[in-house]
Amino acid sequence: MVLVGGWDSSRGAGLDADRDALACLGHRGRVVLTAVTEQSEQGLRNSWVLPPGALKAQFGAAIPGAGAVKIGMLGTAASVDAMAECIDGLDIPVVLDPVIAASAGGTLLSADGMEALRERLSPKVTLVTPNLPEFEAIGGVEWARNSGTAVLLKGGHMDSEVLVDRLWLKDGSEHSFEHRRIPGGNLRGTGCRLASAVAASLSNGHTLTRAVSEGIAWLQQRMRQQL
């Protein structure tokens, strides 16, 4: 599997969280580094995005034999466009976690990068996994139903004890996954881990609905383990 994303200096999210998920699930991932960030639990301080050519070169070396791709932080429109070129024509699952902001605060995707992600990258992937703020920023329900790809809206930002993750499939069908909020479950990088877990399940040949269900169940278990 190929993991595309940024490195979090606090090691709470990004590629470290992706690799944690794969290790727990018995998978290994080759890494495509897109950016280096300076951040802590208090927030993002700085970030440095690698040039598109470096992203393409890494991806070209990592993709042979891979069973799936998980995309995280890209940072700029140029990086988004480079990734759209990289996955064009791939016949393996691609899961896009649209990393727009750090969970502790700070922007990780430029405004033109957001437009490129919505218009040029997301239609080419198997699944997009936004949280509620990301979902609204990209275009909300109208976008989800007309995006040309499957969309999983993660419910972690809901203000309720029962959380609902909503999955829109390309055929127009919708599925909901309910689970109770885990008290004290503040593991950082949950979005990274969930997207990686879903990609791992897809690489095993499972359907999208089953992969999402398995990914959510695994993340719940992982969060309980860290309490």
Image (cartoon, rainbow, N blue to C red):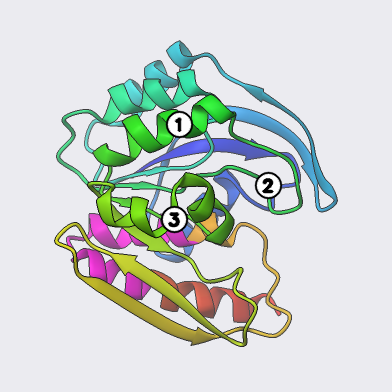
- Which element carries disc 2, helix, strand or loop? loop
Outermost residue, right side: 42
Rendered location of residue 108, percent (x, y): 63, 36
Please provide the residue range marked out in magenta. 194-214
Q: Residue at x 85, y 51 (%)?
A: 42
Distance of label 1 from label 2 (alpha carbons): 19 Å
* Foreground of the two, 104 or 167: 167
Rendered location of residue 197, percent (x, y): 40, 61
**Left or right of 39 in this view: 68:** left
Q: Is residue 194 above or below residue 210?
A: above
The residue at which mark 3 appears reads as 140
Q: Residue at x 67, y 60 (%)?
A: 188
The residue at which mark 2 appears reads as 102
Quarter of the picture containing the N terminus is top left
Three-letter code, disc 1: Glu
Which SS does the magenta portion mostly show?
helix
The residue at which mark 1 appears reads as 115
Distance of label 3 from label 1 (alpha carbons): 14 Å
